[in-house]
Image (cartoon, helix red, strand yellow):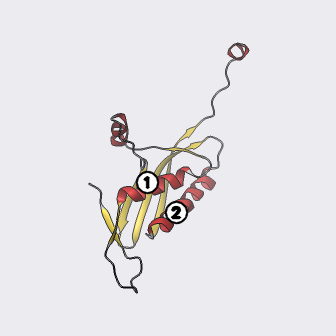
Amino acid sequence: MSEYTLLTIDEEKESLGNIEIARDVIEVVASIAALEVEGVYGLQGSIADDVAERFGRKSYGKGVKVEFTEHGAVVTISMLMHYGSSVPVTAKQVQENIQQTVRGMTDIHIEAVNVHIIGLQFPEEEQPLQEQEK
């Protein structure tokens, strides 16, 4: 079951009711925002995510963990980068894009975006000359 947080869009207007956003929704938004950044190869989920995918359940928020605090949310992301990309530049762009995208789509304040670089994706090695001649 997903954990929810309540949003107050505008306290000055007459309330029409509560708006609830599942943690999974924020994880998906953050995941997509991270993958939009040049230099990011992919996200690394947990073993549970891998098992779920093998049984046909797509895990769009894999590699992203969201924790709610009294002041907003903390996002932690585990990702792989393309070899040759600047780690600090790419990580900073990921932080900024996640913060802006989540805030823009949900109005939830993001206190921090913690980025864990867990691996590099190297370019495909060139095929040997013998295979290229065929």
Label 1 residue SS = helix
How far separated are the C-alphas under marks 1 and 2? Answer: 11 Å
* Residue ID at (68%, 25%): 126
Q: Is residue 63 above or below residue 14?
A: above
Residue that numbered label 2 is attached to: 101
Is residue 127 rendered to the left or right of residue 114?
Answer: right
Residue that numbered label 1 is attached to: 28
Q: Point out residue 97 in the picture as x, y percentages from the top left corner.
A: 56, 60
Q: Point out residue 1 in the picture as x, y percentages from the top left corner.
A: 26, 54
Q: Earlier in the sequence, mark 1 or mark 2?
A: 1
Decide: few, some or many residues near mark 1? Use Cα within 10 Å; few <14, some 14-19, many ≥20: some
Is residue 52 rendered to the left or right of residue 29?
Answer: left
Name the image quarter holding residue 47.
top left
Label 2 residue SS = helix
Is residue 30 rendered to the left or right of residue 14?
Answer: right
Q: Is residue 69 above or below residue 128?
A: below
Name the image quarter holding residue 15.
bottom left
* Residue ID at (54%, 65%): 100
Name the image quarter holding residue 120.
top right
Q: Point out residue 61 in the picture as x, y percentages from the top left corner.
A: 42, 50
Identified by mark 2, the residue type is Thr
Residue extending furthest toward the front = 16
Residue extending furthest toward the left = 1
For the image, the number of numbered tags is 2
* Residue ID at (52%, 62%): 101
Q: Are marks 1 and 2 in contact (CB under 8 Å)?
A: no
Decide: few, some or many residues near mark 2? Use Cα within 10 Å; few <14, some 14-19, many ≥20: some
Residue extending furthest toward the bottom = 12
The image quadrant where one finds the C terminus is top right
Identified by mark 1, the residue type is Val
What is the number of the mark on residue 37? none
Q: Point out residue 121 in the picture as x, y percentages from the top left corner.
A: 57, 37
